Structures are given as C-alpha cells and as structure tokens.
Amino acid sequence: MVTVRFAPSPTGYLHIGGLRTALYNYLFARHNKGKFLLRIEDTDRTRYVEGAIEKLIEVLKWCNLEYDNIPIIQSQRLDIYKKYVDELLQKDFAYRCFCTSERLEEMRKNQIAKKQPPKYDRCCKDITKEESEKMAKEKTFTVRMKMPSEEIIFNDVIRGDVKFHGSLIDDQIILKTDGYPTYHLANVVDDHLMDVTHVIRGEEWLSSTPKHIILYKYFGWTPPVFAHLPLLLNSDKSKLSKRQGDVAVEDYRDKGYLQEALLNYIALLGWSTEDSQQIFTKENLIEKFSLERCGKSGAIFDIQKLIWMNGEYIRKLSIDELTNRAIPFIQKAGFDTSNFDFLKKCILLEQDKIKVLSDVPHLIDFFLKDDIIYDEKAMQKVIKKEGTSTTLSTSIADILKDIINVYSQIQNFSAQEIESETRKYTESKSLKTSQIFHPVRVAVSGRTEGPSLFHMLELLGKEKVLLRITKIIDTL
Ligand code: GLU
C-alpha cells in the first residue's frame, strides 16, 4: 500500500512551501488509495517553539488535509532512536565523537581560512571500541555515521538518477550530546518503521538523501521512492522569503483567503495537467495528481494569480456560505453580526467585488454603522465640487433637497421604485443621471464606489437614506 507522510519541524507557523509538500503527499495518497501520515520532527530542541505543534495541526485542519494516524512526535521516541544508534555503533557503521565544540569550531575556522570545505576531520573515527565505551562514561559525545567513500546513486521520480560522492559528505552526527537524534537518523528510522513507500519533500532535502541512502544500506532496509519538489520562488526568482510577502499559511487564512482557493493555487506550484487546467475541486486534484507531472524547475509564487483565484472561489460560494465565512472578519472589525439576513443582503450586493474575506467589513461598513466616514476626495469631487453652478443649473444642495422630497413620497421603497422615481426627476430637470446618482451615492455611503445604487438605497431603507442626505445638505 502506498504510504506517505508529511514531516514538518514545528517552527511556529506553516510555510507555504510546507503546505505544498503536505498537499502533494495528501493528493498522492488519496489518488493511490494509500495512507497519509503526519509526523512531527521536533528533535532540534534549540528550535523548540511553545505551542508550535498545536498551531501546525490547527492549520492543517483548516486546510482540510486529514491525516490517517495519531501524529507521531519524534521527541517522544528517543528510546527507539537510541536503539538504532546502538545498532550502528555495534556494526561499526558509526562511532562516538568526543570532540569539543571549541575544537570543532577551531577546525572549521582553519578550513575556511585555507579555503577548504568545512568537514569533520574524523579525529575520533579510530578510537577503539573499548576505549570509546570507557570514554563514554566520563565525557559527553555525539555519534557520527561513517560516510563511505563511494558513489551514491538514487533515483528521484522527478529528477531521474541523482549522484553524489560519499567522499564529499561529512560524517554526519546522528545522535547529539543531549541524547536527541538528528534529523537524518530519526527521519530514516521513522520512515522505515512507518512503512513509508514514497518520500515526497522539497528540493532543499535533496542533498540529505545520499546520507539517508547510506543509513538504509547500513540498516539493511529498502529505501522508499524519492520525489523532490521544485523550490518555490518570489517573482524575482529568489527563494520564496518573508521579506517579499507572506509565507505563513496562517497569514493567508487571516487575510481571508479561502482554503479551497489556496489549495487549488498551491497545487499548481510545481504540478500541472497536460491541458493546463486552472480550477480544480479537491476531488479533481485527487483524480488527476501524479508525481510524473511535477516539474523540476522552480515555481513562482504569484500573489496576483492567487488573489484572482480567490475571487473566483468567492463568487462561486452560496451567499449563506459566504456570509458565514465572512462573519469572523466582520466581528473582528467590531461589528455586530447577529442579524444574519441583513448581513447576507449586504454581502450579496458586494459579492462580485470581494477578493479576500478581510475586504468585507470595509465594503459593507456603511450599512452597519450610523456614523459613516465621508471620503474627503469623494466629497470634494462630487458634493462640494468647485464650479458646480456652472455645470449644473441647480446646486447640489437643491438637488439633494429635491431628492428628499421625491424619496419621501415613495411608499414602497424598493430598488425598482427608487430607480424609476429618480430617473423621472432627472428627466424633469434635464439633468444627466450621473449628476444625481453620484451625489446620492456619496451622501448615503460616503464614497464614490459601491454596489448598485438603488439596491443599496433599498437595503439601507428610507429612513436612513433621508437622514443621511439631510445631514449632507446641512454641511453644504
Ligand atoms: N523535518 C523536515 C522538514 O521540516 C522533513 C523533511 C522530510 O520530509 O524528510 O521539512
């Protein structure tokens, strides 16, 4: 059975690249009716972040990437790793290293000064077993695996045959002085114990793979199939970094990207179908995903495309669903959300314009509060504009006063009625519609842009509309 895993190190947030890795593993597992497992690689205690595991699990949940196990947490499995380290020591595939950090640092400096690649000089490699056992009782030590001086070739589904030479690779530390294993050892042991058949991970791990291949060989285990996904890049082709925009999935969630849209977009960062399909349901992705169609060249993270895609998804949501999803954002902006039907009507008028859910509070706030903010530019341009008298036969104030009269007489304050009465008035005064529509819009909403004017007026209701127009006249 196909078994894959997502093996993040909890750093405090889930990187977009991590989400892509998780997603590809998930899609591959579901496509092959296999298992998708979660393993938390937290053996680097210097990078421990409080609450990071919980956060990671929460984000995966938000993404709907359900895993099929109780997550394995490496820091709880030290005994297991220790056993395998002992096995390697026993078989002479590893040795204890008693070098102090000062010595190692000194050595590194000298090598750099001599323009040599920094590498452990294997000073402790030939300490006899007996001596090493004895020293282990008195001194702190690490355990290093012996890298053989041989060519290491492995096949990568995405890259074909990949070659490294063992002589160029350091004798990796597999057990640290604090008793925790390093990534390499824990990763290989767990992939084996979890029956992982395919390792799908980012390109940055490609250079670790020869070390893993050797560990598999030392343990006598069959390595899994490897697939290293292309790097994610900024638009200038540098490695995707915080400096050029958000990289944490949480940030996208908090800005109001829909998880379906984010996943759809991320799916295309390194994978495509022959016909370059862009919009996929999750089921679609599961059906079509294959490692063979993953590319090896870096994939550019294009925020504009993500924004576009998010808008597409927002427009496809039912209004109930969209309202439900927007509510946390509206609440966060400080508005009361108890009147679901009213919110729904407000949002419906703006559905076309919403790019991310965090746009919603601003787009509808003039429906929700009484003290609306008048955009100064809009006021200058539309209400208080200079030269009004030369372009209009009557002043804006007079027009708005007339509008109050007209609207007061409308019994059924519906968009249709309001529109027909407004147009009638416009014609009677031989004005252009824009000469009426714009001032009315600014008077009731404070801005020049917004939803369809008459629907907006209907939803605000006669009372508020009259009140707001009166207020504006008072300022003129
Ligand atoms: N812990 C590694 C990471 O943070 C896992 C790499 C792998 O999948 O082997 O990405």
Image (cartoon, rainbow, N blue to C red):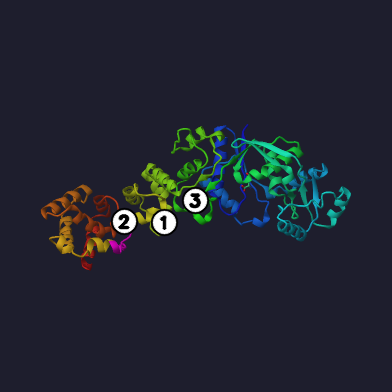
Q: Which residue occupies the extreme right position in the image? A: 130
Residue 400 visible? The answer is: yes
Between 179 and 269, which is closer to the camera in this rendering?
A: 269
- Quarter of the image containing the C terminus? bottom left
Q: Mark 3 or mark 2: which comes first in sequence?
A: 3
Q: Mark 3 or mark 1: which comes first in sequence?
A: 3
Picture disc at residue 236: 3
Q: CA distance from mark 3 to mark 2?
A: 42 Å
Some atom of ligand 1 lies within 8 Å of the CB belonging to the residue at label 3: no
Q: Residues within 10 Å of mark 3 (few under 14, many from 20)?
A: few
Q: Mark 1 or mark 2: which comes first in sequence?
A: 1
Circles 3 and 2: CB atoms closer than 8 Å: no
Magenta stretch contains residue 138: no
> Could you tell me the amino acid type at mark 3?
Asp
The majority secondary structure of the magenta stretch comes to loop
Circles 3 and 1: CB atoms closer than 8 Å: no
Q: Is residue 432 left or right of residue 225?
A: left
Q: Quickly name the residue at label 1.
A: 331
Image location (x, y in percent) of residue 102: 76, 61
Picture disc at residue 367: 2
Label 2 SS: helix
> Could you tell me the amino acid type at mark 1?
Gln
